[in-house]
Amino acid sequence: MTQSNPYCAMPFVHIKQFQNHVFGPCCEFENSLQYQSNKIKIPQVEKPYDGPVVSLTGSFNSEYFKEIRKEMLEGKIPAGCERCTKKENIGVGSYRQWANENFNNPKNPLKELHIEQDLNEVRGLDISFSNECNLTCRMCGPSYSTKWSSVYGKFESLYNKEWSRPTNYLGTWKVNTDNISKFTKLEYVKIMGGEPFISKEHDSFIESIPNDVIKNIYFEYNTNSTIFPKKEVIEKLKNAKGGVLKLSIDGIGELNEYIRPGVSWKNIDKVIRLWHNFVLNNSKWIIQFAPCWQALNIQHLHEYVNYVKQFEIESDRFDDSHISDIVGGSWYSIGSNRVLTPEPLAINILPKKYKQKLIKKYTEKIPLIKYNKLTQNLINYLSDENDKNKTYKKVATMKDFNEYNLAIDTACNVNVFVDLNV
Ligand code: SF4
């Protein structure tokens, strides 16, 4: 490995700001392993840790980042990169490979490789502006949602069950995005939450990006689709290179209201249609519906596809040949992520016979050819008997599922009844 070819491009060009307040080079990076190996304090947005409190720009040349770069320039693999090395060892594609393909390839090589990098070398950001959110989604938690934190006291005891690890609730926070205009070479910005479009910091960030910078940026948004941004933000985003809007919708109608208490489906449906209109008129943007497949919605694939299909029909007259290599995909798609925590919502808690019935249904009736792969992924989840988290004392059961959901129903005044037909 030479200096011109570090193990990974990420620490030289990218900043990840985690929801647990700390910064790191990317979302796969294990800060705890890195800290154990070199004892350099991890930069953070706000206390409570022992590391320095820094702004977004300040994190990039913190001692922590510099040491990671130094290790890579010396030909070492930082301890925090374990997830990537493990994946590659078993032949699974890693984030490192994606990063090197996008940020360090013959067409677009890494130019500057210093322990201290200039701010204008930052090409990618993965950022949550705050944990401000208007929903109490069942699979979320207080560190990601202020709405959750407002009712957290009512749930806290649930987190000390034997099926769970203790939560580390750190309260509300906001990241300081000073000097953002120094990131002149940004080309990829991933925005998570809280809910990004609720955040004033988010709006100021977007509005502060110069037009000759935003025109090169591909965005990836994760939004709960309850808020359509204000006009100024929309106008600015129209100037971007493009983007993918990942809409976190977990069910259609009442099911979504049940899984994500806080905003009516009518409102969400309205915002989805506004986004649909946006992508119809801005052909460099695409929509991905991004459900978290779990015990509460795994049986509703057909309804989900039927809802999404209504938008796709119009897409026949749409040219999506321009879609970014960074995210890829067609202009409408449905994601296949599954819930593993909190454990009582995971697919594996469902009774075996029930899962077998669903496997039979999905094997015999795929909703649309386009969703072959998604259907197969759901079948794989339903067949997976090994996804139980063995690090906890106890495996969650249907009893825990009922107890957990009832607690959230009570705390959030939810009175919708979801019949699993188990
Ligand atoms: S090797 Fe993986 S974990 Fe390490 S910085 Fe690169 S992408 Fe992140």
Image (cartoon, rainbow, N blue to C red):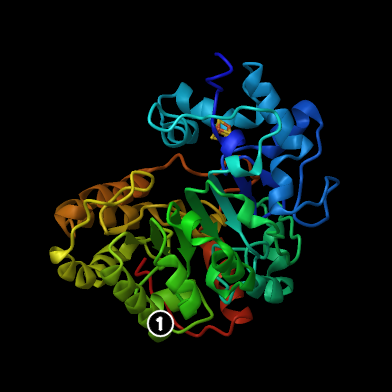
Left or right, 76 with respect to 321, comes to right
* In this view, 3 is above or below 114: above
Q: Secondary structure at mark 1?
A: helix
Task: Decide: few, some or many residues near mark 1? Use Cα within 10 Å; few <14, some 14-19, many ≥20.
Answer: many
* In this view, 268 is above or below 60: below
Residue closest to the eye, 367 or 24: 24
Q: Residue at x 61, y 69 (%)?
A: 204
How far across and down, in percent of the image, does residue 221 sit? 46, 60
Q: Is residue 59 visible?
A: yes
* In this view, 234 is above or below 32: below
How far across and down, in percent of the image, does residue 198 sit? 57, 75
Q: How many marks?
A: 1
Type of residue at label 1? Trp
Q: Residue at x 42, y 84 (%)?
A: 267
Q: Residue at x 58, y 85 (%)?
A: 413
Residue at numbered disc 1: 265
Which image quadrant for residue 288?
bottom left
Quarter of the image with the C terminus in it: bottom left
Q: Is residue 248 visible?
A: no
How far across and down, in percent of the image, does residue 95 sit? 48, 36
How far across and down, in percent of the image, does residue 284 sit? 31, 59
Quarter of the image with the N terminus in it: top right
